[in-house]
Image: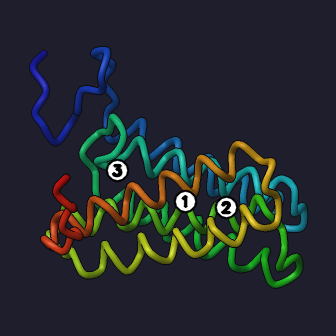
Amino acid sequence: MKRTALETHDLVGGASVSRAQLASALSILETLESIAKDNVAVQASLIATRLELGSVLGDPAHPNLGDVAGARRCYEEALKGAQDLLKTDPNNPQLLRNVSMVDRGLSNLALTENDFDRALSLALDAVDRATALVAMAPASKALRKELGLAHDASYVALARLKRLPKRKST
């Protein structure tokens, strides 16, 4: 049976996923979020899961299924969840890192829509958050990696805006 592009997209490695499978995964995630609404640790894990789903659905920085709208929804829900949890634990490094990752993901999506100013703004927000996180825990490899990825996102946005600084000739 031949499938259309709307029914399936190929991931790197040849795996295919139908829209029904994606809807089922998102439904399960929403059910878990409602069941664990009072468990902060589980909610934090589910936010990380939404970030991963956003990447897989449509983030151009990762192998993805081409569903930019689905990726945006996942990132926005992850952001909302992280912001809600940060109200009770404003210095939680994992939640702050998740917000930085959301900013980066949304920046990537803005690039696909040729909204380079928004992409740069979001990437710079990610840099600011990641810089603050590294200051909190300078030995953390994960946080230093996030800072590097945020800088990469801002560099890409600057390149698209053609605002890269001139290199000095030697």
At 57% from the left and 75% from the top, the residue drawn is: 128
Query: Viewer-nearest of labels 3 and 1?
Result: 1
Asked if 62 appears above or below 143 in the picture, the reply is above
At 90% from the left and 61% from the top, the residue drawn is: 39
Residue that mark 1 sits on: 101
Residue 66 picture quarter: top left
Q: Earlier in the sequence, mark 2 or mark 3?
A: 3
Q: Amino acid at mark 1?
A: Met
Residue that mark 2 sits on: 97
Is there a contact, CB below 8 Å, between mark 2 and mark 1? yes
88 or 10: nearer the eye? 88
At 23% from the left and 64% from the top, the residue drawn is: 111
Residue that mark 3 sits on: 59
Q: Amino acid at mark 3?
A: Asp
69 or 51: nearer the eye? 51
Q: Cα distance, mark 3 to mark 1?
A: 12 Å
Numbered disc 2: secondary structure: helix
